[in-house]
Amino acid sequence: MKFKPENYKSIDVKFTLRLPDELHQLIAEYSSKHNISMNTLILNCISFAMDNRED
């Protein structure tokens, strides 16, 4: 399955996420390259991981 970030229509919860500097930089570069926000990218990554987990 290919990962393709999409925008969310609504966001209901807000929380703080602490990231290592290197991971923050990778997220910033990817989101800039694909013209999406870092928030959208992180939400999509979490959603993708949850949809593809092996319980």
Image: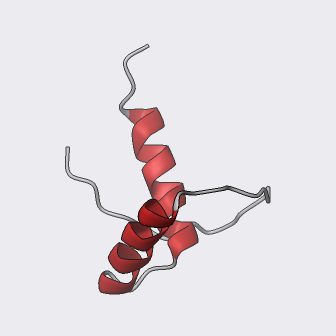
Query: Is 3 displayed left or right of 10 in the figure?
Result: left
Query: Is 35 displayed left or right of 10 in the figure?
Result: left
Q: Which residue shows up at 32% across the image and 81% down it?
A: 34
When asked about the image quadrant of residue 4, the answer is: bottom left
Query: Looking at the picture, how far across and down is residue 42, in whole percent?
Result: 51, 59
Query: Looking at the picture, how far across and down is residue 51, in whole percent?
Result: 42, 35
Query: Looking at the picture, how far across and down is residue 40, in whole percent?
Result: 52, 68
Q: Which residue shows up at 37% across the image and 18% down it?
A: 54
Q: Which residue shows up at 42% across the image and 64% down it?
A: 22
Query: Looking at the picture, how far across and down is residue 37, in whole percent?
Result: 51, 78
Q: Seen from this angle, which residue lies furthest top?
A: 55
49 or 51: nearer the viewer? 49
Quadrant of the image for the N terminus? top left
When asked about the image quadrant of residue 35, the answer is: bottom left
Q: How is the image coloured?
A: secondary structure
When asked about the image quadrant of residue 8, the answer is: bottom right
Q: Note whether 36 is above or below 39 in the view shown.
A: below
Q: Seen from this angle, which residue lies furthest front?
A: 21
Q: Note whether 45 is above or below 22 in the view shown.
A: above
Q: Which residue shows up at 36% across the image and 79% down it?
A: 29
Query: Is 34 displayed left or right of 1 in the figure?
Result: right
Quadrant of the image for the C terminus? top left
